[in-house]
Amino acid sequence: MNPKPWRARLGHRTLILLATVYCLFPIYFMLVQSLKTPQEDVFGNPLIVMNPTLENFEELFERKGEVRGFVGDALRRSYPFLDWLANTLVVFAGSVAATLVASVAAAYALGRLRPPGFRWWRRAIFATYVIPQTILFIPLFQVVNGLGLDDNLLALLLIYPSMALPFCVWMLSAYFQHLPREIEEAALIEGASRATAFFRIILPMSRPVLVAAGIFTLGTVASDFMIASVFLLTPHNQTITAGLGTFDVALDELAAVAGVNLLAIPVVTISAVFARGYVRGLTAAMVEGA
Amino acid sequence: MTPVIARRTRRQRELRTAYLLLSPTVLLLLTVLAYPLGWEVWTSFTSLSPLQEGATAFVGLENYRRQLGDPQFWWAATVTVAYAAITSVAKLALGLGFALLLARPFRGRVLVFLAIFLPWAYPAGVSVIGWYWTLNPPTHTAYAPFMGHVKSGVDSVFGGGAWAFVSVILFNIWRGSSFIAVLLLAGINAIPPELFECALLESRSAWRRFRLVTVPLLKPFLALGVFLSLTSAFADLANVWMLTAGRIVFPVIGTHAYWLAIKAGQYGPASALSLTLVPFLLGVLLLLFRLFDPPEPEVI
């Protein structure tokens, strides 16, 4: 094949550049704002930062908010940011772990053991996505109260997995279903139990799909604002998401943007590290006999 | 024991294991969803309201009938359909474009892939806060005048509150196109390269190859993408609604229901309203299942 004409190559490059700018611009913008001093926030160029400072980040970790000159003593506020960070860590890690364990178990049952009507089980589980979320939190509040979990992180640990489970069960069970029977049978003939065959053979093979399920769960959990701000009310019980939601637009803008970045950096880093595994897992789940 | 009986008892044990393994998922979904859904269905037939004194009356289909006669409902339904259609089409188009850009190797592909992956990976629970303050900025910031111009420009054309709504659309498209791009890239990776090579010999037109080879093979991924993009569109809207405490003037079904329930205290009509979406979404899902979860012939 002869090399492509320069015009096609230039077009390709331009499109790539446009796509990259489109995807990164909002992230870049939020990062730049969080590095600004109050003066530069008001008088500087919105798109660049001349004197980057970390004071907005530091402010989040100070138990007592600094007195800001133009605000005055009365409005100073302190944020229990360390508590928020710890709570967020517990909720995110716990939700991902719970979702993975529950969905692997369910997916193995549906994809390998195949009870009668397993396809409809899977479809029914996936169909829970059609339930409208908007006012569901009113009865959900009754459930959470009934379990004695109001204003408790456990409420989120109960609700978040239900948001990611349907997709994870579907993806993992499709993958397990497509694995050829012989994979386990060899082990079973040798006298291994189903459990051994699962932990020794199937689970290690499924690593990419597990990564995909985990990253999907993390993304789903991190995208919630509504549940966190409805169910977590006392400041020291909140996650970063719920806490930042209570910030005041005019006074705390820079600190809030810094908080946004502080949550984003670890989540994005984890996702980026596993990004290729995520794609590979999605592919494997959809393709027969992958 | 004859082998037939042995096999049967083994199968029974297997089934018991299967149901045991399913139970955590089913229990969790039932706890979180069954009671609330039941409550919503029941409430939609009653006049339940936290503001009302005395007993709650059973009103049958009255709440549904009243919705159908309410111009507010039809306005909200129109906006909902428009919102779902605009965001879905834009996300699919952009996502497919990104996926095709990434399909062929070029220098720096990994970095571009990461850039395209980021909008979805960036935690939307907090980026919605950043989004809100960027698009409706505090008045003292340097970018406030510019955003103010954009806002008044859009609002003067489409009516008050239009910019807030448009910005939700932009936010959802930005985030959703990233998710769909990665999903479709996974789909393209699943297509054996030989197929593309064959297609290259068959037809010189890139458009024909795309339409006759790429799209049909991507169908399951496209179907899955459409459905998840619909649900995420509604979830993003709910987040924004929550954050702005209802400062969106353009009502969609979900937010209108929220408004009825929280601001007006009418739980009955609100439940009826939010349930009107379910049959449609279920119908769409059943159609899409045939594409991404087909009943394949049993492998022998």
Image (cartoon, rainbow, N blue to C red):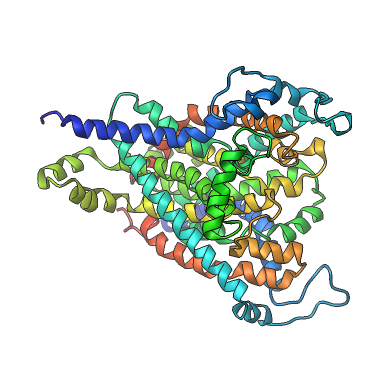
For image coordinates 70% across by 45% down, the residue present is: A228
Q: Nearer the viewer, residue B137 or B283?
A: B137
Nearer to us in this view, B108 or A101: B108
Would you say B216 lies left or right of A52 here?
A: left
On screen, A258 above or below B266?
above
- Count how many numbered circles sit on residues in the image: 0
Q: Is residue B1 visible?
A: no
Find residue A79 and report its image quarter. top right
Classify residue B97 as left or right of residue A48. left
Q: Is residue B164 above or below residue A216?
A: below
Residue A65: image x %, image y %?
81, 26
- Report the residue at 76% width, 76% height from top: B47
Please tell me which residue lies in front, A261 or A215: A261
Is residue B250 at all visible to an observer of this figure? yes
Seen from the viewer's position, the closer of residues B143 and B135 is B143
Residue A276 relative to residue B270: left or right: left
x, y (%) of residue A151? Answer: 80, 45
Residue B38 figure quarter: bottom right
Q: Residue at (71%, 57%) from the top-left corner?
A: A137
**Residue B241, percent from left and from top:** 65, 53
* Residue in the image at 71% along x and 53% along y: B245
On screen, A4 above or below B222? above
* Residue A5: % across, % down: 15, 31
A10 left or right of B13? Answer: left
